[in-house]
Image (cartoon, rainbow, N blue to C red):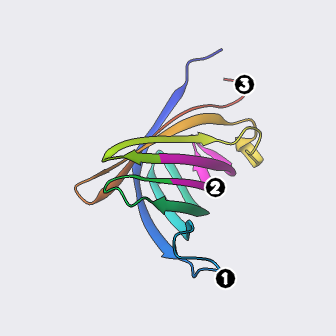
Amino acid sequence: MAPARVARGLFDLRLTAQPLEPGEAPAQPARTLIHKQFRGDLEASGMGQMLSFRSATPGSAGYVAMERVEGRLAGRSGSFVLMHLGEMTRGAPQLSVRVVPDSGTGELAGLSGDMSIEARNGQHLYVFTYRLPGE
C-alpha cells in the first residue's frame, strides 16, 4: 500500500442556526447548517448539518456533524462525506473528522482519510491525510 497523501489549505465557514422544532426544550441539542469553501490542495465546497450541546459547565460541549464535500482533490473530481465528532472538556478540545467509508463518488470513489481542523488568527486551516484506490 502506498503511503498516505496529505492535502493542506484553508476554508471559509458559515454556520446558520436552525430554529427549534415545536415542543423542543432549549436544553436540547442545537441544530446548525454548515457551509464551507475549501481552498488549497482541496478545492471544494462542503454542506452539512451539525447537532451540538453546551453543558452548564464552562468550556464543556460536544457536537456531531455530517458534511458532503464536492470538488477536486489531487486532480480528481467527485464528492465524499465527512463525519465529525467533537468534544470540549472544560476547555480541552478533542476532534475526529473522518471520511465515511464508501462515500466517495466519481474519481474520488474509494477515498479514505482523516482531517484535522484548526482555527488560528481568525482563519480555519485543514490538513487532510487520505488514500485513493490504486495508489
Residue at point 47%, 70% (across, down): 15
Q: Quadrant of residue 109?
A: top right
The answer to whether residue 77 is magenta is yes
Residue at point 59%, 50% (across, down): 72
Q: Which residues are magenta?
A: 63-86
Q: Earlier in the sequence, mark 1 or mark 3?
A: 1
Q: Which residue bears the numbered disc 3?
A: 134
**Could you tell me how far apart the alpha carbons at marks 2 and 3 are, in whole angstroms?**
27 Å
**Residue positioned most to the bottom:** 22
Q: Which residue bears the numbered disc 1?
A: 23
The rendered magenta stretch, by its main secondary structure, is classed as strand
SS class, disc 3: loop
Checking the image for residue 66, the label placed there is 2
Q: Quadrant of residue 13?
A: bottom left
**Could you tell me how far apart the alpha carbons at marks 1 and 3 are, in whole angstroms?**
51 Å
Would you call the spot at circle 3 few (<14 residues within 10 Å), some (14-19), or many (20 or more)?
Answer: few
Specify the amino acid type for callout 3. Answer: Gly
Left or right: where 56 falls relative to 2: left
4, above or below 45, in the image: above
Q: Earlier in the sequence, mark 2 or mark 3?
A: 2
